[in-house]
Image (tube, rainbow, N blue to C red):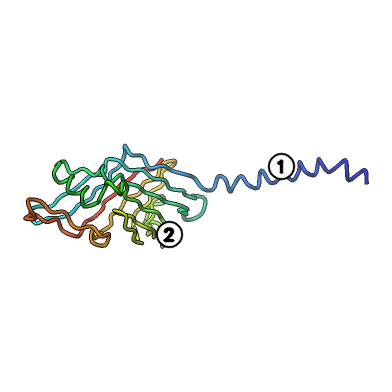
Amino acid sequence: MQYHITHRPSLLKAVIFWLSFALVPVTLAAQDFTLNNSEGEVLVTGTSTLHDWEEVAEQKSGSINLDKTGELPQIKTLRFVVEAESLKSGKGAMDKNTYKALDTKTHKQIVFDMKSVKSISPVTATSNKYKVVATGDLTISGSTKTIDLPFNLTINGDKVMLEGKKALKMTDYNIEPPKALLGTITTGDEIEVHFNTVWK
């Protein structure tokens, strides 16, 4: 009996030591990256009865959790946020109409939350670049729709880049396409979001 009592502390230390090393790979497997607002670009393009237009998102943020240990990287989480009133066209009147259509007084952000990865495959002859289709919820002006978001994922050491584009319809999110000059100029329903983002 005395033998077991004196050796319990040593046994406990051994178990703790083993668990510490066993958990290290789990801790190191996944890495968090934060979107760098000062690098890259998010651009929204569209049409109108007068001319084509574009708006740049000046304030964007987000995070991605990536496991790079396997043959293919695993995206654990992905969240991407654009501040709605940071969309700028360079024309104050157009921006004002955009914010009114998006109801930015109530809905401050445009948000994509990934739910799963539909597919991921390496780009031919490139070891660190992958084609990805992520399924997630896109919320615009308070309306949420589940979409497939295709993009290229590039892993370069401690830097990750996401590049892609996605066609959307304003009316799918209960947004009435903006009008100008007493309705004589109407924005087209279809828009396209282009993104080339850097995460560190």
- Residue drawn 31% across the image and 58% down it: 143
Q: Position of residue 19 (x, y in %)?
A: 68, 46
Q: Give the camera-side residue of 103 and 85.
A: 103
- Residue drawn 65% across the image and 47% down it: 22
Determine whether, in the image, residue 160 is placed left or right of residue 30.
left
The residue identified by callout 2 is 117
Q: Position of residue 173 (x, y in %)?
A: 27, 59
Query: Disc 1 marks which amino acid?
Result: Phe
Q: Position of residue 84 (x, y in %)?
A: 28, 46
Q: Residues within 10 Å of mark 2 (few under 14, many from 20)?
A: some
Look at the picture and state if 157 lies above or below 119: above
Q: Quadrant of residue 10?
A: top right
The residue identified by callout 1 is 17
Q: Give the camera-side residue of 141 and 27.
A: 141
Mark 2 or mark 1: whose residue is earlier in sequence: 1
Give the number of callouts: 2
Determine whether, in the image, residue 16 is placed left or right of residue 175.
right
- Residue lying at the far top in this picture: please name it: 38
- Residue drawn 93% across the image and 43% down it: 2
Determine whether, in the image, residue 147 is placed left or right of residue 190.
right
Query: Disc 2 marks which amino acid?
Result: Val
Look at the picture and state if 115 lies above or below 93: below
Q: Residues within 10 Å of mark 1 (few under 14, many from 20)?
A: few
